Amino acid sequence: MSNTLAPLKGQANMPNYDEARANFSWKEVEKDFSWHKTGKVNMAYETIDRHAETWRKNKVALYYSDDDRDEKYTFQDMKFLSNQFGNVLRNIGIEKGERVFLFMPRSPELYISLIGTLKIGAIVGPLFEAFMEQAVRDRLENSDASVLITTSDLLPRVPYKELPHLKHIILADEGDAPDVDKDTTFHRYELEMSKASSDLDIEWVDREDGMILHYTSGSTGKPKGILHVHNAMLQQYQTAKWILDLKEDDIYWCTADPGWVTGTSYGIFGPWLNGTSNLIRGGRFSPENWYGTIEKYKVTVWLSAPTAFRKLMAIGDDATKDFDLNSLRHVLSVGEPLNAEVIHWGTKVYNLRIHDHWWMTETGGIIIANYPSMPMKPGSMGKPFPGIHAAILDNEGNELPPGQMGKLSVKSGWPSMLRNVWKNEERFNKYFPVKGFFESGDLASKDEDGYFWFEGRDDDVIQTSGERVGPFEVESKLVEHPSVAEAAVIGKPDPVRGELIKAFVALKDGYTESEELQEELRLFVKKGLAAHAAPREIEIRDFLPKTRSGKIMRRVLKAWDLDLPTGDLSTMEE
Ligand code: 6R9
């Protein structure tokens, strides 16, 4: 193999890929967990309490740092605090299976609440703090959430008066808020925690019971609630062990927010299932505080996204010279294609390979990866995890030979596979157009050596700065503006963000194009939906291309915009 990078030095947890693949069995992995003995399980127990019952009880589970706080919590601290939070929920009558949503900035309270929610068997729903009213409403409405934990700053974006199921709001800070508002009762986190016991009978659940709901965007319709169950732990544990290569002395840092699946599967579950010390950094991105964080905490394993690495690359190599980054031994990237250029830069400035890997909200855990022990081909996502069969299929569901691009699919039945789309069985079934296979919506190819290469999305979903944005949500918001008749939104290749959001807008009669109007539309999306969803480019057009059935043809706009062939136009309206 030419143009490969040699494996990392030192003993990896997974020594040899082919051997691991040949001998792998999920049944063996199961033996590490309590259901092996009792038939019941609980993710919160396996991540926290299990370690608190061993010598690890005084080991630091969570290092938390932001511009104002610098704290640490042992596995025992986390056990008692999450017990207390579980009791807070029980004291207000919350039961197994109810949806408890989190809408707050990263803080120790967020992680304690999340674990505490799982302890009583409730289903947790983490939301990005950047969400604006519409995004919050869609998710709380669809999930019929009964509890929301938030802050007084974010409360104005929660239309609780119009959410009949939302019975309780727990405020994690001391800011202003009403006590009771007709149907919603407000509580104070600190006060309720101080009244709650730190003893709790865990709700032992079945492996197939609901655990977490992650809303994600598709190319059409409202965001979908992807449901994962406690059984996901099998995969999150084993992939964290072999791909993140977590070892007893590691200080692990995943930069993702829990509003994104990476921030839970590998920001919480994977590392804690392995008993690893987990660093959480709040606040905003700046190269100084990122490198400063690695230096200060002597981070050993670091997981981030291509946008972050591209930003760090853009500020130049000198930035690394001011910091001691020698503690790093393993670096990983996920969320978008990782350019080979960035990997080569990484080997120069960190003296390490950046390990790209592929998965998605729906898969719950990593599916394809570059392993520390395996030679790396820069630009490739790596090989499927042992025990998982990934394939490149054609439209009929036949496996394609090496070198051909097709639909990246996964043989169904892997442990952390989505179990449903909340209240939308029909959408769930659409993920399985070919019997026995999950269709990811990505296009990829596989080479002669079994390495997978990402080619693009099969639909219109946009990946911008590591965030997945559904064009439909942005279009819907734009169309709410009084001046907008129609809108179409596409992702446009961008060297730093992966893709940037571009909107094409047809104005209503009586409105004319102006820079002020464009700026107003941008702000309108930013305030109504989320800053990362606001279009960077807006182009006003007289009309938008449509199919005969009235669907706006984003792919045609994209082709026009990028000067590419438009493909089949047979369905286009005259
Ligand atoms: C974990 C996560 C999933 C989509 C996925 C694909 C893109 C993720 C990638 C990648 C190229 C990689 N994606 N990892 N594309 N190379 N290594 O990102 O989940 O937010 O659901 O996004 O992200 O298009 O289908 P999610």
Image: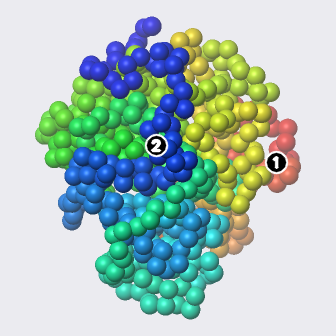
Location of residue 254 with respect to 91 vertically, above or below: above
Q: Secondary structure at mark 2?
A: loop
Label 2: how many Cα within 10 Å (few below 14, some 14–19, many 20+): many
The residue sitting at 64% across, 25% down in the picture is 391
Residue at the spot of label 1: 547
Tell me the quarter of the picture where residue 431 sits. Answer: top right
Whole-percent x and y of residue 166? 57, 78
The residue sitting at 44% across, 90% down in the picture is 179
Whole-percent x and y of residue 266? 42, 44
Q: Is residue 88 left or right of residue 500?
A: left
The residue sitting at 42% across, 54% down in the picture is 45
Residue 531: numbered disc = none
Q: Amino acid at mark 2?
A: Phe
Q: Residue furthest top?
A: 1
Tell me the quarter of the picture where residue 76 sits. Answer: bottom left
Can see residue 260? no
Q: Is residue 154 left or right of residue 166?
A: left
Whole-angstrom CA distance, mark 2 to mark 1, is 53 Å
Residues 180 and 377: in front is 180
Location of residue 130 with respect to 28 vertically, above or below: below
Label 1: how many Cα within 10 Å (few below 14, some 14–19, many 20+): some
Q: Nearer the viewer, mark 2 or mark 1?
A: 2
Mark 2 or mark 1: whose residue is earlier in sequence: 2
Q: Is residue 440 left or right of residue 100?
A: right
Residue at the spot of label 2: 33
Q: How is the image coloured?
A: rainbow
Q: Amino acid at mark 1?
A: Thr
Can see residue 572? yes
